[in-house]
Structure formats: C-alpha cells, structure tokens
Image (spheres, rainbow, N blue to C red):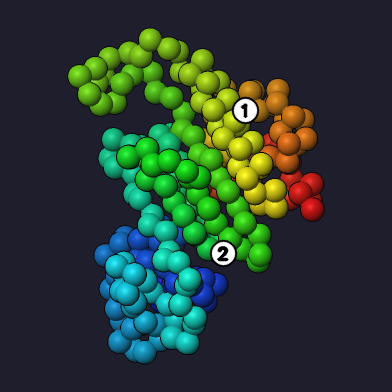
Amino acid sequence: MSLRDEVLRVLDQSPGGMTDAQLATGLRRRHQTINQYCRRLAAEGLLARDSSSGTIVNRLVGAAPATTPPATVHESSADRAWPHEAAVQSALVGWLVRESWQIVRVADTETRERGTNVIAERGGVRLLVEVKGYPAATYARGPNAGQPKPTAPALEASHSLADAILKAMRMRVADDGARVVVALPDATRYGALLTEVDQSLRGARIEAWMVGESGEPTAHFGAWPEDLS
C-alpha cells in the first residue's frame, strides 16, 4: 500500500481528524513527508486541513469535525531514548494509531503534565493508559548528569510500577466502563513484578502491557478484554 493510500486509510478510520504529527507517529514516517502528502491530498480535494482549533487537523472531505481538537503527540527528544517514558509513550501511541485507535489525549512527559498519559477510543471502547519507562542508572540531566543515582534501577522500577498501579486504580474508580492499562517497556524486572501481581490486577480489572520499541505489546498481564465485559 502506498503512503498516499495509508494516509487516506488512517484518516478514514479517524473521522475527527489527525494532525501531521499524529499521522507521522502512527505511520512511522518523517513529519515533513507527511506534511507534503497531506498538502497534496488537500490540493486534490480529498482532505481538508482545518486550523480553526489552532492546530492544523487533516480530515477527509465530508467527515464531521471533532467536538474536541485532536491530542498533540509529543515526540521524545534525543536524550529521551528507549526505555525512557517519553520514548515508550511515543512508540505506544504510534502502535495504537496503526491499530485504528483514535487518540484523544497524549500527555507531555517532558513537562510532567498531570492526568492520564494516553486516552484513545475505538468502536465505542475508551482506553486509559498510564505509561512508565525503565529507570536509568545515572542522571540524564542537571548538575549530576552522568553521575550514578543512589537507588538501584531494579528497586526504582518497583517503585515506578507501584505508582503506576495506584494511578490505574484511581482511573478505574473514575471510569468504571473504560479499559485501564499500565504500559511499560519490555524489561525482565517488570515482567517478574507483574507476574507477582497478575491475579490482583485481574481482580481490579486493570491490564498491564509490556511493549517493545515498535510500541506493540509483547506481553500481557492482569485483565483481558473479555474480563471487562
């Protein structure tokens, strides 16, 4: 399938529209390339580039405008490489887009924006995701950059997972009908911890995904979609 057809296919599955950044992340292409294709499709009269929300949104001609503007996809910076939280979130959002989920919200991890990290919808199902990265052994920024952290990554990972599960439980209370997911990079330590709490997560109707660098889940713990009906 050509990139032109891929853009049209993804937009057809997202009637509310998508920004160039969302398309670039979902299709794993350069932002500039997507921008050129969208401009070309707009010139052909196949899509509209709506800037009324302050951000240019690509929408197939004839599709209904979104009631809320699409979420902004924040790209991870060079020093936020895998398995940093920003990189994990960006990869996961890209995979969700490729799986025909419409992205409603993506939090800015660089500014530590509060709230649910990722919100997506598909076929009447609402997905709420809390994302965590894997702790580094050294500081990445600031006056201590390059210096070892006092807490071992394995111990810090357990604290990070505990924090993610607490947030997921709060999301479950706030929205009983949604699928609630904790998304983590595929790491041995996380796998061991999730195995220990698998049944508890299932009882709380919380899913836990370990994801690879493509954003696709490589392991699944806790609740399964059929458990949520």
User: Does residue 135 lie above or below 3 as drawn?
Assistant: above
- 191 left or right of 117 in image: right
At a point 37% along the width and 71% down the height, the residue shown is 57
- Residue closest to the far top: 150
Disc 2 on helix, strand or loop? loop
- Residue closest to the far front: 174
Q: Residues within 10 Å of mark 1 (few under 14, many from 20)?
A: some
Which label's residue is closer to the chain start, 1 or 2? 2
Residue 141's tag is none
Residue 26 spot, x, y in % from top left: 45, 59
* Quarter of the view holding residue 174: top right
Report which residue position mark 1 lands on: 191
Q: Is residue 128 visible?
A: yes
At a point 61% along the width and 63% down the height, the residue shown is 122
- 133 left or right of 129 in image: left
At a point 57% along the width and 35% down the height, the residue shown is 167
At a point 54% along the width and 28% down the height, the residue shown is 163
Residue 14 spot, x, y in % from top left: 51, 71
User: Does residue 6 lie above or below 229 as drawn?
Assistant: below
Disc 1 on helix, strand or loop? helix
User: Does residue 78 lie above or below 29 as drawn?
Assistant: above
Report which residue position mark 2 lands on: 100
Residue 192 spot, x, y in % from top left: 64, 23
Please tell me how many numbered marks the rendered image carries. Answer: 2
Disc 1 marks which amino acid?
A: Gly
Disc 2 marks which amino acid?
A: Ser
Residue 176 spot, x, y in % from top left: 70, 48
- 102 left or right of 111 in image: right
Instruction: Give the Cα separation between the discs numbered 1 and 2.
Output: 27 Å
* Quarter of the view holding residue 51: bottom left
| Depth check, front residue: 36 or 45 | 45
